[in-house]
Amino acid sequence: MTSLATQSPNEAREALRVLVVDDEPSITQLLAMALRYDGWVVETAGTGTDAVAAAEAFRPDVIVLDIMLPDFDGMQVLSRLRQAGELAPVLFLTALDSVEDRVKGLTLGGDDYMVKPFSIEELVARLRALVRRSQLTRGQGPSPILVVGDLVLNEESFEVSRDGELIELTSTEFELLRFLMRNERRGLSKAQSLDRVWSYDYQGKQTVVELYISYLRKKIDSGRGPMIHTVRGAGYILKPAE
């Protein structure tokens, strides 16, 4: 876990805590990697028993909960968490897609429901929406503004500006820039960007990342001090212009 003393202002403000519960290691590893690179603090569990214990010790802001677990199912996990006073919003992540399953999960106190296979970008967006609603209820809503040097991105209005000048971006350019800004001064590989922005089941090639980085550079860096840099063997990094 990164200490707050070494975090960027964006990281310190966005240190949201998420508990990911799934008995498939490939799913928990994928989500943990994507969420950590998005600035989250992540804890994982593979069973219902571990999930209940982890929620008590970790105190997450939001929980991703698989329904099909090896000891007892996600519905029972949620029931035990609510009985214990755990109020963190829960997003069910499951292969079960019937209307009955959705209704049951939401009736028991779940807050959202996604079916596998899923888009990581959509899942992260839904988690942030759940946390925002939860925090607004308590009067603690996080700021939607990301700032790196003279570059400003508003997650709610989808506006981007540099040195006060508005910059028009497509939705994909916006998501890629947001990913870079959330990971200010971190080298991000093309594979990480592909997984985070284009979703884990995207079948395209990493060259699409190169293409969109070139688009961003033309819009963000053209005529200004460069902020987006290529790191040999690592990918790309965004930092304030020198």
Image (cartoon, helix red, strand yellow):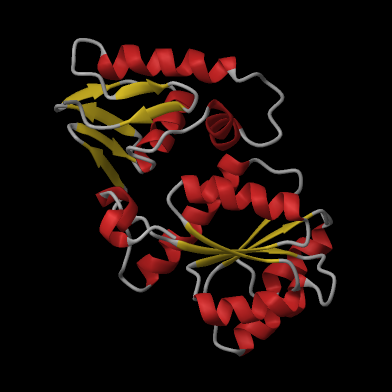
| Residue drawn where x is 33% and y is 39% of the image | 184
Q: Quadrant of residue 13?
A: bottom left
Whether residue 169 is visible, yes or no, is no
Q: In front here: 187 or 122?
A: 187
Q: Residue furthest front?
A: 233
The percent position of residue 91, horizontal first and vertical second, equals: 62, 61
Above or below for 30 versus 158: below
The percent position of residue 23, horizontal first and vertical second, equals: 78, 62
Q: In front here: 72 or 191?
A: 191
User: How many numbered discs, if any?
Assistant: 0
| Residue drawn where x is 74% and y is 75% of the image | 48
Q: 220 left or right of 48?
A: left
| Residue drawn where x is 50% and y is 51% of the image | 36
Above or below for 52 versus 133: below
The percent position of residue 123, horizontal first and vertical second, equals: 59, 48
Q: In front here: 7 or 132?
A: 7
Q: In front here: 61 or 1?
A: 1
Above or below for 136 versus 157: below
In the picture, the quarter occupied by the N terminus is bottom left
Q: 225 left or right of 18?
A: left
In the picture, the quarter occupied by the C terminus is top left
The percent position of residue 66, horizontal first and vertical second, equals: 73, 62
